[in-house]
Structures are given as structure tokens and as C-alpha cells.
């Protein structure tokens, strides 16, 4: 895909997307097992403007991550799927060869400048560019960065406990994209309670999609950017928060985290940055009666 053309300003920080991949390969029913086509009666107008195929059957989703520049730091929030990865249960996303580092350069970022990589969770599509393959060896793509990740995620994905049906597409991602970072001493861990990580940046527990997922909030001059990880996969779920995606591992907890995230974004008027949303993948959540509504930004 490409570097996102929009540059968002939130206080003194800027946020820009790297869109690694886009697909219409999932029907709404594949992505959201509880999908009810009567949803279309009210929502079809905005959905066919880039959120769903015109067949009104397939949804559009993306894989990507965010570049955040503060006056002091260059930060990545998650790192997409990566090149050359060997994902034995995920052939369609194995061995990608995309000009990701060129997209970073277009955004004015050279890998040596990145000082923090903040990881929401450790699924294959969030950790890939942590490392790159050099002479047959996985080395950190961002050699001067600290890679910050939830401890619960590291423990789980570093053990065979995670080798279950829900996570089979991520098998090997830990070995290729996380362990090499730990081995060279660049990893730091966030405890299960989350909380302030540094000035204006906090981790917010939002488990359910995965065992120890965390969202990330960055505030600057009274404005807030909310990186909501995978609590939602598509803006359809803003309107129907009880609908999990097929990728949610712990159903009840995923619903609770989704409601909390929507309330958080709406009540704080935070700019919401999704991982897998179509279009810009960013926008505003607001309250609408007992529920919520979505507007792309
Ligand atoms: Zn994901």
C-alpha cells in the first residue's frame, strides 16, 4: 500500500499512518460472526464510501501502524507484519516484500532515529517490523529504540500455551520478531496494570482480543490521541459493540474492553487511531443515545 497522506496534529505531536495492506477478502459475516445484514438498512450510505465493497457483502480492512513524532521523540505504535517473515499457518502474509522502510523515509523517519516502539500486543501483524532479516539473522530494525510491550503478552506468546487455534496465524512471530529484541536487551515490559509510561504517554489495559492487549494514550497540550489497538476491527462495531470480530480470543472480555474504549474516546474527545479500520483508520467516536457513532477524520 503506502504511507498515509494525512498528517494529524494532536497538541504538539504529529501522527501519520503506514498502510501496509488492504483487503476486501472478508465478508462481513466472516469478520463479524454475529453480523446481521439488517444493519445495512441504516448504514449502507457511509459503508459503501470506502468501508465496504459495493456488493454490500465484503468489508474493507487494513493492516498498518502509526508514526508519532513528539518534540523530543520518534515513536512507532506497533510495526505491522514485516518482510521475509515465515508464518507457517499464514501463507498469504508470509514472506512479504514491501517498501516499508521507504515509506518511513518518505515520512522523514530513518530507522536509527526511532527511539521508542510501543507494542499494543504481540500478534504477527503488530510486531513484524520490530526486526529485519540481515544475512539470515533477525536483527532490530530500529537499533536505537526501546521496544515496550505488555509483560502478559510476552509471557504468553513466549510459551507453547499460545499455540492454540486462535493464535495459530501468529506462530513463529514471537521467535522472529520479539525474541531477537529481548536477546539484544532492547525490550522493556509494562505490568498488567498499565499506567503512565512517560510524560503524556500511558498504557491502558484492554484485553480480550488477546490476553494482555493494551491501548495507548498520548496527550499533548490538552489534546489526546488514542491508539485503541484491536479492540475494534471495523467501525461497524462502534454501532454494535457487542459484535466481536473473528479474531477476538476471549469473547466477554473483548466486549467489555470495546465498550470501555468507546466510552473513553467519546468522553475525552480523543482522536481514535485504529489498526485495521478502512480508509484513514482514524476518526472520532461520539455518544449517540445509548450507543456510539463514528466519523472518519
Ligand atoms: Zn491486529
Image (spheres, rainbow, N blue to C red):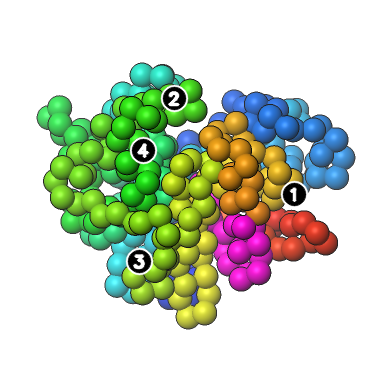
- Cα separation, mark 3 vs mark 1, equals 31 Å
- Residue drawn where x is 42% and y is 50% of the image: 120
- Give above or below for 132 relative to 220: above
Is residue 193 visible from the viewing direction of this image? Answer: yes
Mark 2–mark 3 CB contact (< 8 Å): no
Between marks 2 and 1, how big is the CA–CA gap? 30 Å
What is the C-alpha distance between the residues marked 4 and 1?
32 Å
Sequence order check, earlier mark of 2 and 1: 2
- Mark 3, Cα crowd under 10 Å, few <14 / some 14-19 / many 20+, is few
* Mark 2 burial class by Cα count in 10 Å: few <14, some 14-19, many 20+: few
Find residue 156 and name its label. 4
- Mark 2 to mark 3: distance in Å? 31 Å
Residue occupied by mark 1 = 239
Question: Is label 2's Cβ within 8 Å of ligand 1?
Answer: no
Dot in front, 4 or 3: 4
**In the image, 2: left or right of 97?**
right
Give left or right: position of 116 versus 9: left
Q: Position of residue 134 (x, y in %)?
A: 15, 34
Marks 4 and 3, how far apart at CA: 22 Å
Q: Position of residue 146 (x, y in %)?
A: 24, 56
The magenta region covers 260-276
Q: Secondary structure at mark 2?
A: loop
Gap in angstroms between the C-alphas marked 2 and 4: 11 Å
Looking at the rendering, which quadrant does residue 192 occupy?
bottom left
* First in residue order: circle 4 vs circle 1: 4
Which residue lies under the disc numbered 3? 197
Pointer 4 with pointer 1, Cβ within 8 A: no
Amino acid at each position: 500500500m503506502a504511507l498515509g497522506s494525512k498528517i494529524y496534529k494532536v497538541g504538539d505531536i504529529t501522527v501519520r499512518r503506514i498502510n501496509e495492506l488492504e483487503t476486501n477478502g472478508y465478508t462481513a459475516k466472516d469478520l463479524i460472526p454475529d453480523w446481521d445484514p439488517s444493519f445495512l438498512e441504516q448504514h449502507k450510505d457511509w459503508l459503501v464510501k470506502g468501508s465496504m465493497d459495493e456488493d454490500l457483502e465484503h468489508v474493507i480492512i487494513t493492516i498498518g501502524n502509526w508514526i508519532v513524532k513528539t518534540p523530543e521523540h520518534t515513536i512507532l505504535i506497533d510495526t505491522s507484519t514485516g518482510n521475509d517473515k515465515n508464518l507457517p499457518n499464514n501463507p498469504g502474509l508470509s514472506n512479504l516484500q514491501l517498501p516499508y522502510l521507504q515509506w518511513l523515509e518518505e515520512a522523514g523517519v530513518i530507522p536509527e532515529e526511532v527511539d521508542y516502539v510501543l507494542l499494543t500486543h504481540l500478534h504477527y501483524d503488530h510486531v513484524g517490523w520490530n526486526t529485519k532479516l540481515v544475512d539470515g539473522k533477525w536483527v532490530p530494525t530500529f537499533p536505537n529504540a526501546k521496544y515496550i510491550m505488555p509483560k502478559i503478552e510476552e509471557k504468553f506468546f513466549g510459551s507453547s500455551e499460545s499455540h492454540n487455534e486462535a493464535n495459530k496465524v501468529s506462530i513463529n512471530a514471537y521467535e522472529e520478531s520479539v525474541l531477537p529484541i529481548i536477546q539484544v536487551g532492547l525490550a522493556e515490559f509494562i505490568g498488567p496494570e498499565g499506567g503512565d509510561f512517560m510524560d503524556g504517554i500511558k498504557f491502558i489495559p484492554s484485553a480480550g482480543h488477546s490476553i494482555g492487549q493494551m491501548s495507548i494514550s498520548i496527550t499533548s497540550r490538552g489534546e489526546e490521541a488514542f491508539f485503541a489497538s484491536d479492540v475494534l476491527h471495523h467501525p461497524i462495531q462502534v454501532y454494535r459493540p457487542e459484535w466481536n470480530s473473528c479474531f477476538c480470543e476471549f469473547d466477554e472480555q473483548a466486549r467489555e474492553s470495546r465498550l470501555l474504549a468507546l466510552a473513553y474516546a467519546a468522553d475525552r474527545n480523543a482522536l481514535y487511531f485504529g489498526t485495521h479500520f478502512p480508509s484513514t483508520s482514524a476518526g472520532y467516536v461520539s455518544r449517540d443515545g445509548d450507543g456510539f457513532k463514528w466519523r472518519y477524520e
